[in-house]
């Protein structure tokens, strides 16, 4: 067997990068090749991070220099400056997430999750973004359950949507099924990134940077951390992506009512943290109420966004719809009712919770006279999590 030098064990998990090999320590050629492949991957990732940070920051710096020299900036220029800074900030956040996942510090809690329903829910709540980009979505889905970390699966699916929103042109085909053997669930995507009439005259392997963006790198890293198998094929006009879930629930063997979750090894998603990663929009004008709501749900793993007015909430929902809407009772009026009606037309199962001015009242939607859950101000810490669990679980 051929042997080569292996890097010594390092205590510092610097981005998951393998160290250079010292003269002592021996491994086989296959291990060395895997190490070299990982090294090349992270070298390319670092170069890409530099590019995606430098490009928007350079443009932003030019605008700032122009502002310093003229003392003026118009509304369009200010909007562009904010967008460039936000792009750089987002690139930094993605880099931090990739680093954390690659270092092995992410803790996972495997649960029984309905993959098909989760995919459908994610797509439903991002329909407006897809429509705004003119993306035609085709779906073909079989009912499939898998064992996975619910919040990480949610991040994976939303990362995929972020990725194809940046690179898709025209159509995205989404399929969920089970391969014949082994019987593993598959998420099969075909994303057209270039119109057919522009494919002529391209060099082999030439693809837009958006196809291999940091968003894709994050998706790939999440899938690796979850232990999923990823196969991606790129041709002149489209990307074919297949994500395989080895821990698939066999419908012929699965016990629909497990008697002991500890013996099962995995908790049912409805009994553990099924709502982790769900997106909640809070509409509250008072800062103290926003802080109270944040404190009450901090252990639920939710994605929270806060706005202080109905106008801001309306603008927010034009971009993407949340899974739940919590609103301050003092803001209730015609504008808010109109917003709620428009959301319900698109997502009938959206969870709605009204926070009352005072009292310890707690009503779920099925008994509330308004058809929405209601929680009194004094009951927020204890009752708001229960209200969200009930209201969000109805849509699972």
Image (spheres, helix red, strand yellow):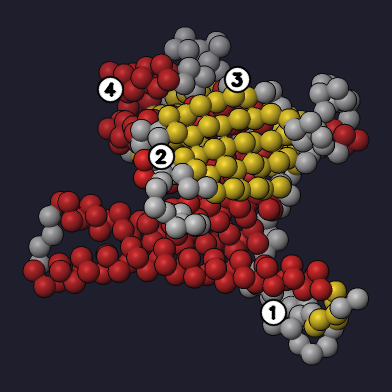
Q: Which residue is mark 3?
A: 394
- Whether residues under marks 1 and 4 lie with C-beta atoms below 8 angstroms apart, the answer is no
Instruction: Tell me which label, 1 or 2, sits earlier in the chain.
Output: 1
Image coordinates of residue 112 in percent, x first then y, are 75, 33
Distance between the alpha carbons at the discs numbered 2 and 4 = 44 Å
Foreground of the two, 212 or 151: 212
Give the spatial CA distance, label 1 vs label 4: 59 Å
- Residue at the spot of label 2: 196
Dot 1 alpha-carbon crowd within 10 angstroms: few under 14, some 14 to 19, many 20 or more? some
Residue that mark 4 sits on: 335
Q: x and y percent of residue 38 in the render?
A: 67, 67
Q: Is residue 94 left or right of residue 288?
A: right
Callout 3: helix, strand or loop?
loop
Is 81 drawn above or below residue 229 in the view shown? below
Question: Camera-side residue: 104 or 58?
Answer: 58
- Location of residue 150 by image quarter: top right
2 vs 4, front mark: 2
Contact between labelled residues 3 and 4, with CB atoms less than 8 Å apart: no
Q: Cβ–Cβ below 8 Å for labels 2 and 4?
A: no
Marks 3, 2: nearer the viewer: 2
Identify the secondary structure beneath mark 2. helix
Q: Earlier in the sequence, mark 2 or mark 4?
A: 2
* Residue 11 visible to an observer of this rendering: yes
Q: Which residue is mark 1?
A: 19
* Residue at the image position 37 percent from the left and 57 percent from the top: 87
Q: Nearer the viewer, mark 1 or mark 4?
A: 1
């Amino acid at each position: 067997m051929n042997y080569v030098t292996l890097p010594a064990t390092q205590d510092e998990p610097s981005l998951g990068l393998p160290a250079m090999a010292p003269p002592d320590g021996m491994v086989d050629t296959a291990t060395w090749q895997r190490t070299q492949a990982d090294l090349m991957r992270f070298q390319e990732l670092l170069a890409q991070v530099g590019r995606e940070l430098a490009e928007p920051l350079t443009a932003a710096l030019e605008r700032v220099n122009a502002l310093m020299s003229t003392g003026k900036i118009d509304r369009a220029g200010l909007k562009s400056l904010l967008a460039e800074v936000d792009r750089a900030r987002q690139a930094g956040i993605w880099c931090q997430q990739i680093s954390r996942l690659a270092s092995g510090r992410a803790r996972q809690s495997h649960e029984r999750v309905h993959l098909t329903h989760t995919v459908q829910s994610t797509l439903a709540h991002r329909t407006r973004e897809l429509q705004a980009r003119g993306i035609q979505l085709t779906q073909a889905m079989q009912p499939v359950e898998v064992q996975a970390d619910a919040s990480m699966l949610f991040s994976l699916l939303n990362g995929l949507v972020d990725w194809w929103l940046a690179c898709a042109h025209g159509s995205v085909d989404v399929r969920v099924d089970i391969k014949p053997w082994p019987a593993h669930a598959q998420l099969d995507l075909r994303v057209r990134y270039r119109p057919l009439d522009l494919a002529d005259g391209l060099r082999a392997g030439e693809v837009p940077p958006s196809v291999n963006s940091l968003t894709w790198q994050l998706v790939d890293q999440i899938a690796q951390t979850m232990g999923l198998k990823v196969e991606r094929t790129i041709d002149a006009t489209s990307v074919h992506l297949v994500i395989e879930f080895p821990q698939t629930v066999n419908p012929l063997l699965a016990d629909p009512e497990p008697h002991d979750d500890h013996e099962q090894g995995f908790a049912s998603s409805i009994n553990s943290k099924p709502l982790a990663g769900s997106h909640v929009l809070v509409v509250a004008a008072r800062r103290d109420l926003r802080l109270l709501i944040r404190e009450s749900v901090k252990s639920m793993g939710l994605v929270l966004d806060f706005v202080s007015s109905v106008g801001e909430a309306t603008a927010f929902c034009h971009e993407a719809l949340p899974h739940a809407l919590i609103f301050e009772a003092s803001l209730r009026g015609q504008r808010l009712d109109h917003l709620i009606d428009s959301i319900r037309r698109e997502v009938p199962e959206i969870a709605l919770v009204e926070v009352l001015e005072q009292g310890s009242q707690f009503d779920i939607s099925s008994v509330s006279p308004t058809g929405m859950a209601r929680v009194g101000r004094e009951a927020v810490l204890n009752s708001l999590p229960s209200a969200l669990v009930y209201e969000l679980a109805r849509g699972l």
